[in-house]
Image: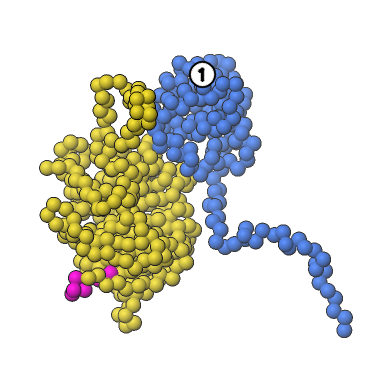
Chain colours: A yellow, B blue
Amino acid sequence: LKMTSVHKFGQAVPIQCHSWSAERRSLALSHNNNTVEVYDQVSGGWKLTDKLEQHDLRVNDIDWAPNTNRIVTCSADRNAYVWVKGPDGKWKHTLVLLRINRAATCVRWSPQENKFAVGSGARIISICYFDQENDWWIAKHIRKPIRSTITTVDWHPNNILLAAGSTDFKVFIFSTYIKEIEPKPSATEWGAKMPFANLMAEFSNSPTGGGWVHAVSFNSEGTRVAWVGHDSSIAVADAPSGMVMMKLKTSMLPLLTLTWIAPNKLLGAGHDCVPVLFHVDASGKVSVGSQLEELTVVESAASSSAMNMFRNKDRVGTELLDNRLYSTHQNQICSMRIYSGTKDGATAVSTSAGDGNLVIWDLQTLAAKFNDLKL
Amino acid sequence: QIYKMAKNTNSTAFRRIDVDKYSEDNYKEDVDNETVTAGPSENEVMSLISQNKQLDALKYVLANSPLGNKNQAVRDAALTLALRVMLSFKTSQIEEAVKQLDYEQRDILMKYIYRGFEVPNEGSSAQLLVWHDKVFNHSGVGSIVRVLTDKKKV
């Protein structure tokens, strides 16, 4: 059984974002431009089945709702589109007026798929829901106390609470309760009163460091939220223990994306181009675990690479520099999704990176090699 | 009826106001009400160095570093002392000293190392490069990233 499988989709252009259909038979991704490509799995590879071309500027995020089978895309053109597959198999779009005057940066469907949240550079989170009466998507704004661009959002399982990370070094937990479409939520560990846009909790990355928040993730029960920051740190806040925040400053390059893969395990990936495991103990303390690849340098039996470099310079007149990284991904990993399993017990994750590749990591076979991956 | 003209029509000072400063959109830094330390005392540092207690002097300057202190003079004075301590070590002692520090202290030390590079002085950079190497071996690129991203400057 293979530990990793590498998938390519045309030219080696960074895959900014990707999202899987429910059965994982289809994949929507964007090559850092204004279109979204939909691929279907066929024997031996991938077939491009559709191109979603409506956005004017770069598509920043995509999310494919597994149950309702709708795709939502958001872009630097300040818009979001909801795509529904028609009976003819073609994707039809509906424009969503986000009412923002800056780029939309990230988007996620809520667990029940009746709402989606869009973060933006306008320092606003747009919570969008469908209004049957007028047959359009309505966006409600969350503004206070956001003071800079929202970079990442993740939903609590109760379909109401939303975690958001920002470039103002903060992580917010907001309520997105919309009385028109859902019943009043019962109290959670994050608080009891949940009017729309209520700030339930706020965590700051800056007193103990700094750096933009790149990704947030609620655990499967919604009792903990984890995030990664540009100060090469990873932190976990635990609601039941009184919103205690535990931060780990790593010795690696900053992580850009993360997800819970077990109640006590996080998987992060970023500028080091390899996913890294983190353990979270009962008190919420984070410690670093294995990297999912051994990056051992295989030295050639002959001279060192510096010598080879000058020898080649002499002989050929140019430097034959080998710029390949020893990891599977050759550029920073910008997006990571659970491919199989859940946040409670993920068995595989997919990563897309600046090298234009999508890699699927089989965590069960990897657990044979890296013991601390065992669930 | 005689209308008196407003007194300030002669002044053109209003043209020099920087209106962008007052824009609502501007990012306002968090008001940090945490008390910051005033920095290490020179006497204490010199006394420890003269007693050949370089490691204690190092731990002292790191524990008393005026992180985030808005007074530039205080931070500069602390930097001078930190550099003096770092340069008082024999090159061969540096590795052992770094091993005795915890990860928080090493992060602060890395910040002083980079500030020290900014003000090279009689071969100080050579010694600082050794410090850099030893701290890097423990704290990796993460500590260097934090030199760039941490809000509380040293």
Q: Which residue is mark 1?
A: B89
The quadrant of the picture occupied by the N terminus of chain A is top left
Quarter of the image holding residue A110?
A: bottom left
Is B127 left, or right, of A302 in this rendering? right
Is B40 left, or right, of A330 in this rendering? right
Q: Is residue A85 magenta?
A: yes
The picture places residue A317, in percent across and down from the top left corner, at 38, 29
Q: Secondary structure at mark 1?
A: loop
Return the residue nearer the eye: A34 or B78. Answer: A34
Residue at the right extreme?
B2
Res. A333 in view: no
Is A271 left, or right, of B149 in this rendering? left
Q: Is residue B108 magenta?
A: no
Return the residue nearer the eye: A308 or A291. Answer: A308
Q: Which residues are magenta?
A: A83-89
Quarter of the image holding residue A374?
A: top left
Label 1 crowd bin: few (<14), some (14–19), many (20+), radius 10 Å: some
- The residue located at (22%, 70%) in the rendering is A90
Return the residue nearer the eye: A57 or B107. Answer: A57
Residue at the front extreme?
A316
The picture places residue A344, in percent across and down from the top left corner, at 21, 52
- Judging from the image, mark 1 belongs to the subunit labelled B
